[in-house]
């Protein structure tokens, strides 16, 4: 018996006390296209987001290829490609860099070759080195299609996929849909166009007020409308296996039709044949690579943090009497005030950049361990703060006339910074989803940072004016780091998920 590509039973979704979906039952077989019709606010996008793993159902069950979308979420994400109103791309990265990054997240083999193939397929091969921010709306939408098809998904989830496309772009989208279905894939898409729904879908489902009110049979997908639209003169080129260009055609042999959806062909498996994600360190380094490249081009975090830290140091230098007898009391406080406030400025920006197109949706779509996301963001924050500290420390030494390389100053700065970043990364993830994140982040972070701040200031002061009765402040900072790093790794998944 054939396992349905999609089977939904009694699916419900509530936002607080407001019901959005009130019990959805659907079945989608391999090679079929189902179209969802309905007015705005009827729950179509909510349904697609739940199937993509971006939201959890309040009740009911949904399975993709026999895998539960909640219990087997990581494996399900390998099987799904999602095109929504938001392109889920990084504007400061180039088109090629975006596909390379997402290819690493999905564990796509030969990702460079696959990315270039798709860029040529969607007509962006000449723009692959340009940043997404410079592309037009239609070109961004084409790139979003390339991202969704990158890992050769079994099920395409399309939320008004032709939005923002011109006539040639719509012909291209129809061509991609036709190829996907002919090769054994399935499609669930939403649209407001009733004529297109009847033409495109094997099933046309009308949703009203969160319930299915009508199911119609559309025309079987046979590509006849593709041929009619191609009469306008558009022609698309698909790279062949040998590397030469051939006119777009439907696969002929059974082996060729099924090749794109063989998980063995594009994703790593373990010895039991199940889908295997990349190791957590590889995922974390890939996200860190993306964050560093993004920041090097946007320059929104480092410059602001550095200027803020230098301003604090200069103000403290002119505001206090820095004689020898009180230098040890004033200088450490000035240093750590500069580091902490500059860090909070950077912590708010790094996560806010991720949430520009939704609460971390671009990363949450990928089958990546949530701990890898936290570790990457933590390492990125430590790196960003560290760059500011490298610039600020020599200036601090000159302004306050203190030795730069004295005792254990560098370990104190390193582990103190790690403590700030550990707490800051966790709570900036929570605060970034709110409108008042600039106000909320310090309120959440400052109380928890009190132990590490006190320990760092006292340890630095003890270096400038040694005392035999001081406790092991550096050891206390390290213990703080270990405890909160463990807590953060255990709780981050629950915070970042809905």
Image (tube, helix red, strand yellow):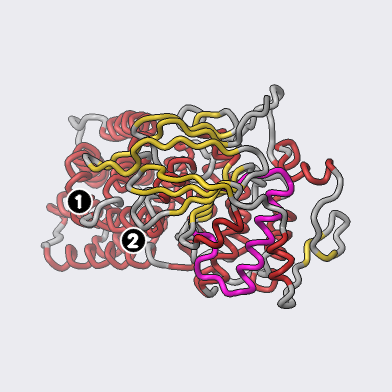
Front residue of this view, candidates 36 and 237: 36
Q: Is residue 130 magenta?
A: no
Residue 330 placement, left or right of 361: left
Quarter placement of the N terminus = top right
Q: Is residue 79 above or below residue 402?
A: above
Which x, y percent locates residue 258? Answer: 77, 42
When asked about the image quadrant of residue 285, the answer is top right
Q: Is residue 150 above or below residue 154?
A: below
Q: Which residue is mark 2?
A: 392
Front residue of this view, candidates 427 and 393: 427
When asked about the image quadrant of residue 271, the answer is top right
Which x, y percent locates residue 91? Answer: 49, 65
When asked about the image quadrant of residue 100, the answer is bottom right
Give residue 112's mark: none
Q: Residues within 10 Å of mark 1 (few under 14, many from 20)?
A: some
Residue 185 placement, left or right of 297: right
Front residue of this view, candidates 67 and 103: 67
Judging from the image, what secondary structure is the residue with disc 1 in? Answer: helix
* Residue at image coords 11%, 62%: 321
Task: Answer yes or no: is residue 408 visible.
Answer: no
Tell me where the magenta segment starts and ends, as one range. 160-187
Quarter placement of the C terminus = top left
Residue 51 placement, left or right of 416: right
* Residue at image coords 38%, 46%: 410
Q: Which residue is mark 1?
A: 440
């Amino acid at each position: 018996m054939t396992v349905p590509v999609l089977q939904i039973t009694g699916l419900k979704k509530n936002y607080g006390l407001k019901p959005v979906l009130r019990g959805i039952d659907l079945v989608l077989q391999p090679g079929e296209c189902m179209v969802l019709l309905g007015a705005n606010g009827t729950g179509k996008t909510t349904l697609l987001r739940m199937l993509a793993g971006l939201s959890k159902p309040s009740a009911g069950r949904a399975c993709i290829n026999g895998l539960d979308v909640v219990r087997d979420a990581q494996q399900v994400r390998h099987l799904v490609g999602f095109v929504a109103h938001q392109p889920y791309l990084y504007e400061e990265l180039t088109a090629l860099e975006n596909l390379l990054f997402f290819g690493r997240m999905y564990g796509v083999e030969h990702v460079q070759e696959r990315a270039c193939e798709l860029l040529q397929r969607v007509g962006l091969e000449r723009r692959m080195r340009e940043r997404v921010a410079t592309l037009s709306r239609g070109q961004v939408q084409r790139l979003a299609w390339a991202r969704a098809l990158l890992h050769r998904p079994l099920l395409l989830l399309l939320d008004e996929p032709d939005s923002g496309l011109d006539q040639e772009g719509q012909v291209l989208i129809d061509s991609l849909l036709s190829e996907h279905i002919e090769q054994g894939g399935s499609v669930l898409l939403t649209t407001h166009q009733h004529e297109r729904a009847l033409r495109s879908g094997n099933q046309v489902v009308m949703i009203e007020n969160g319930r299915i009110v009508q199911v119609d049979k559309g025309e079987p997908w046979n590509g006849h409308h593709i041929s009619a639209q191609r009469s306008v003169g558009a022609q698309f080129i698909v790279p062949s296996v040998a590397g030469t260009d051939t006119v777009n055609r439907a696969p002929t042999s059974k082996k060729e039709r099924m090749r794109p959806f063989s998980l063995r062909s594009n994703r790593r498996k373990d010895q039991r044949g199940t889908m295997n994600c990349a190791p957590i360190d590889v995922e974390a380094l890939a996200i860190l690579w993306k964050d560093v490249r993004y920041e090097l081009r946007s320059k929104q975090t480092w410059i602001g943090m550095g200027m803020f830290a230098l301003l604090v140091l200069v103000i403290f230098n002119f505001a206090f009497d820095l004689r020898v007898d009180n230098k040890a009391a004033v200088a450490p406080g000035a240093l750590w005030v500069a580091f902490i406030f500059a860090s909070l400025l950077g912590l708010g920006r790094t996560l806010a950049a991720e949430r520009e197109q939704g609460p971390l949706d671009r990363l949450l779509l990928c089958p990546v361990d949530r701990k890898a996301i936290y570790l990457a963001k933590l390492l990125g924050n430590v790196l960003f703060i560290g760059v500011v500290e490298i610039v600020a420390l020599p200036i601090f030494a000159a302004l306050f006339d203190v030795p730069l390389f004295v005792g254990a100053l560098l370990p104190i700065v390193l582990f103190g910074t790690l403590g700030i970043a550990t707490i800051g990364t966790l709570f900036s993830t929570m605060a970034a989803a709110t409108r008042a994140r600039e106000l909320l982040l310090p309120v959440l972070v400052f109380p928890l940072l009190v132990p590490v701040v006190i320990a760092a200031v006292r340890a630095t002061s003890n270096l400038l004016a040694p005392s035999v009765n001081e406790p092991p402040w550096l050891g206390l900072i390290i213990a703080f780091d270990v405890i909160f790093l463990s807590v953060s790794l255990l709780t981050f998944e629950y915070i970042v998920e809905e």
